[in-house]
Image (spheres, rainbow, N blue to C red):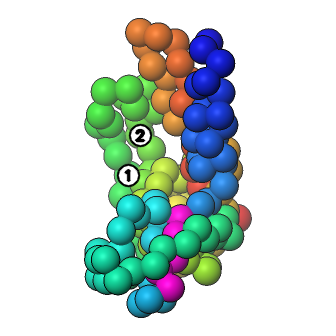
Amino acid sequence: MHRTSVPLLWRRFKHHYRLLGNHCKTCKTDYYPPREICPTCRRKGVLEEKEFEKKGTIQTYSIIYAGPVGFDKQTPYAVALIKLDNGPVLVSQIVDAPFDQVKIGAKVTAVFRKIYEDGKEGIIHYGLKWKVV
Ligand SMILES: [Zn+2]
């Protein structure tokens, strides 16, 4: 591994492990994932980093039976729209739960898990998934 790539990997890791988004000070809107510019305020937007609590509620969900390439070994799996307790809505996979526990209004919390394995290079990508509390 090239030495200069370590800080970059660490930055990515930090962003994957923590729920880091941002907040526009101009219109008081939260974003996750973080935006480069505020879509509402454009140039007037002042974005600052904001960490969200890894807690939320399922707003709606679906069970995926045929996943995209790279996710096919994980099917079937549940994907939900999660409203963060102190943040915006995001889309993520629900793990560690029989599907009958995945329901609208269920409380969820984030866990750090393998997202997918890059077959060719053998690189394992990690990130946040969610489980029912
Ligand atoms: Zn804004």
Report whether residue 13 is seen: yes
Q: Secondary structure at mark 1?
A: strand
**Residue 53's x, y, as percent?**
68, 70
29 in relation to 50, above or below: below
Image point (38%, 52%), residue name: 63
Q: Quadrant of residue 86?
A: bottom right
56 in relation to 12, above or below: below
Mark 1 residue type: Ile
The stretch in magenta equals 21-25
Q: How many residues crowd around disc 1 within 10 Å: few (fewer than 14), some, or many (20 or more)?
A: some
**Residue 16's x, y, as percent?**
59, 46
Whole-angstrom CA distance, mark 2 to mark 1, is 7 Å
Residue under numbered circle 1: 63
Which of the image's four quarters has the C terminus? bottom right
In the orientation shown, which residue stands out farthest toward the bottom?
27
**Residue 116's x, y, as percent?**
49, 29
Mark 2 residue type: Pro
Magenta span contains residue 75:
no
Residue under numbered circle 2: 76
Q: Quadrant of ligand 1?
A: bottom left
126 in relation to 54, above or below: above
Figure disc tally: 2
Report whether residue 98 is seen: no
**Residue 55's x, y, as percent?**
66, 70
Q: Are marks 2 and 1 in contact (CB under 8 Å)?
A: yes
Camera-nearest residue between 43 and 25: 43
Q: Secondary structure at mark 2?
A: loop
Image point (61%, 24%), residue name: 4
